[in-house]
C-alpha cells in the first residue's frame, strides 16, 4: 500500500520562536532561547507502521498534578489542501499520568501554515493524574503525536475566508 505524501514539517523562524517562547518563559534570555531553538527536532514517526508523528520537547519539563503548561514547539506543518493535522498526547503519558491536551484534540488546518505567526504549533498539556503522580519528561522526548487525516466538506459549502491569525482566529469576525 502506497501512503500519501501530503505534508512537510519545518521550524518557524528564530524570530517567531523567540517571541512565542519568551512570552511564556520570560526568564529565558536570548542566549538560552537560541540554544533551545537550535535543538528543536522535527516530528518523526517511530516505525514504518506508525500513524502518529512524535512531537518532541525542546526542554525538560516537570508537571505536578493539576498543572498546565503551554509548549511552543517551534514547528509548523505545510500540508496539501484537504488534509488536517490532529494533535493528541502520547499514549504512554496519557496512561501513566493522564496527560491531556487542554483542547482535547488539536486541529491544525492546512491554511494555518500561512498565518501571521508562521503556523507555529503550540501544545497545551495538563497533568490530570488522579494518584498525584508528578510527570517528568526529558528534553528531546516525545510528548504529543500528530496524525494527518483527509477531510471532506458539504456539497453546499461556500467558505471563502482567508486566515491571518493563529489560535482562535477563524472565530473572530
Image (cartoon, grey):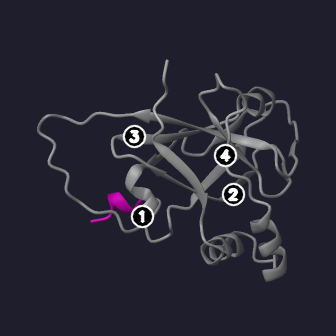
Whether the magenta-drawn stretch holds residue 170 is answered as yes
**Gap between marks 4 and 3, in whole Å?**
17 Å
Given residues 123 and 83, the one toward you in this image is: 83
Q: Do the residues labelled 1 and 2 touch (CB within 8 Å)?
A: no
Mark 1 to mark 3: distance in Å?
15 Å
Q: Distance between the residues labelled 1 and 2?
A: 20 Å
**Residue occupying image coordinates x 79% and y 31%:** 130
Magenta stretch: residue 139 in it? no
Question: Magenta stretch?
Answer: 168-173
Q: Which of 88 and 127 is in front in this view?
A: 88
For marks 2 and 4, give the one nearer the viewer: 4
Point out the image quarter for the C terminus. bottom left
Tag 4 and tag 3, C-beta contact below 8 Å: no
Tell which circle, 4 or 3, labels the residue nearer the N-terminal end. Answer: 4
Q: Which residue is drawn at 64% across and 26% down?
A: 50
The spot of residue 126 in percent (x, y) is: 70, 45
State the residue position of label 2: 71
Q: How crowded is mark 4: few (under 14 residues within 10 Å), some or many (20 or more)?
A: many
Tag shown at residue 43: 4
Report the residue marked by disc 1. Answer: 114
Specify which label sits upstream in the sequence, 1 or 3.
3
**Would you say the residues marked 2 and 3 are in contact, meaning their CB atoms lie under 8 Å apart?**
no
Q: Position of residue 20 (x, y in %)?
A: 63, 71
Q: Mark 3 points at which residue?
A: 83
In the rendered view, does 123 fall on the left or right side of 4? right
Amino acid at each position: 500500500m502506497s501512503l500519501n505524501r501530503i505534508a512537510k514539517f519545518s521550524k518557524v523562524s528564530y524570530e517567531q520562536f523567540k517571541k512565542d517562547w519568551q512570552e511564556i518563559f520570560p526568564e529565558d534570555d536570548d542566549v538560552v532561547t537560541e540554544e533551545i531553538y537550535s535543538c528543536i527536532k522535527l516530528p518523526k514517526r517511530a516505525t514504518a507502521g506508525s500513524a502518529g508523528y512524535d512531537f518532541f520537547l525542546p526542554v525538560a519539563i516537570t508537571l505536578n498534578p493539576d498543572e498546565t503548561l503551554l509548549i511552543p514547539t517551534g514547528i509548523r506543518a505545510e500540508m496539501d489542501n484537504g488534509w488536517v493535522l490532529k494533535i493528541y498526547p502520547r499514549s504512554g503519558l496519557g496512561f501513566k499520568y493522564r496527560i491531556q491536551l487542554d483542547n482535547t484534540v488539536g486541529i491544525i488546518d492546512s491554511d494555518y501554515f500561512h498565518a501571521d505567526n508562521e503556523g507555529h504549533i503550540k501544545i497545551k498539556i495538563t497533568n490530570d493524574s488522579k494518584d498525584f503522580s508528578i510527570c517528568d519528561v526529558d528534553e528531546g522526548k516525545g510528548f504529543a503525536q500528530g496524525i494527518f487525516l483527509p477531510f471532506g466538506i458539504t456539497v453546499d459549502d461556500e467558505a471563502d475566508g482567508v486566515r491571518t491569525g493563529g489560535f482562535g482566529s477563524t472565530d473572530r469576525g
